[in-house]
Image (spheres, rainbow, N blue to C red):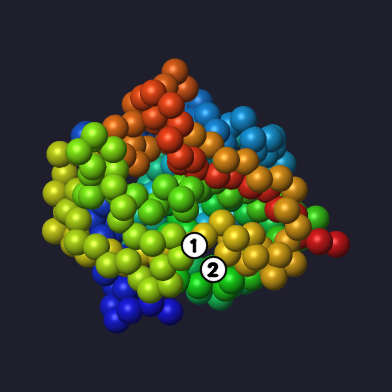
Amino acid sequence: MGGEGWREDNRANWDERTAVHLGPGSAYDLGPLRAGRGALDAIVRAELGPVAGLRVLHLQCHFGKDTLTLAQQGAAAAVGLDFSAPAIAAARRLAEELGLSDRARFVEADLYDAPRAIPEPGAFDLVFVTWGALPWLPDLAGWARIVAGFLRQGGRLYLAEGHPTAFVFDDAAETPNGKPGWYAPYFEREAVVMDDSTDYADPTARLRHARTHTWMHPLGEVLGALRGAGLALDWLHEHSRLPWRMFRSLVRDADGLFTWPDRPWLPLAFSLAARKLD
């Protein structure tokens, strides 16, 4: 699964990003969460539905901002998993600070080790995966089987992610008209290895651990992986906006999301709900 050292490079990158994302220059705003009114982004907020009383598993939770928001919104239990030790340590500190440790639990483990780290098969009503999660995974079929294994019968997955069509482009290949240019083929099967010291949440930050390994996952592969794991699609939406500035030319809209300044040149995000078959 992937080239030599991919997991170590990616973990070092995210370990370093954690401090950046908790720093003063970060776009992550913890003020509402600390005030007891944490909110999910506008896309997720419109689609997810009530979580009160649900047992929720948040995979690739980073430092737990959305996990803790789900707990604030009434989830009976919210379990966050991430492979970064600094991120999980920060999440646990936040849970303690917010008085949510009784309902929000954080586990440090690689995604593919999740069934061992959380030995609770079929225990969750909802698996929650959002924004910048799938490109870090070389084996999407394995991910889907893990999701299905954690869900109770009839439980559902909510997934919101950058659109794979948009991941074909990057600002590093910017065209003369200021639009992002070709970056990686849509059907690329090998890891995309990149050395980029910038950070999406703080434009002033420069990362020392700049090398990352990511993978292209066409939309058909995502849907096929879910179906192969026994999950049935409830719905699929595509969006011309998303919660982070994927490209420099995007502008912020009234909902705080980033979108094209003139017309929707290509989809920027997709979201879906899938249910574990009875």
Residue 90 at x, y = what percent?
A: 35, 50
| Residue nearest the viewer, comparing 250 with 33 | 250
Res 259 → quadrant:
top left
> In which quadrant of the rendered image does the C terminus lie?
bottom right
| Residue nearest the viewer, comparing 20 with 223 | 223
Circle 1 residues within 10 Å: few <14, some 14–19, many ≥20: many
- Judged from this view, the residue extending furthest toward the top is 254
On the image, numbered disc 1 is attached to which residue? 217
Q: Is residue 103 left or right of residue 24?
A: right
Q: What element does badge 2 sit on?
A: helix
Measure how far apart labels 2 and 1 are at the Cα level: 8 Å
The residue depicted at 47 percent of the width and 22 percent of the height is 255
Residue 89 at x, y = what percent?
A: 36, 55
Answer whether residue 67 is visible to the viewer in this image. Answer: no
Residue 28 at x, y = what percent?
A: 34, 36
On the image, numbered disc 2 is attached to which residue? 140
Which numbered dot is residue 87?
none
The residue depicted at 64 percent of the width and 38 percent of the height is 48
| Residue nearest the viewer, comparing 42 with 173 | 173
- Which mark is nearer the camera, 2 or 1? 1
| Residue nearest the viewer, comparing 219 with 15 | 219
What's the residue type where badge 1 is placed?
His
- Judged from this view, the residue extending furthest toward the front is 176
Please determine whether, in this image, residue 128 is positioned above or below residue 41. Answer: below
What's the residue type where badge 2 is placed?
Leu
Residue 117 at x, y = what percent?
A: 53, 71
Circle 2 residues within 10 Å: few <14, some 14–19, many ≥20: many
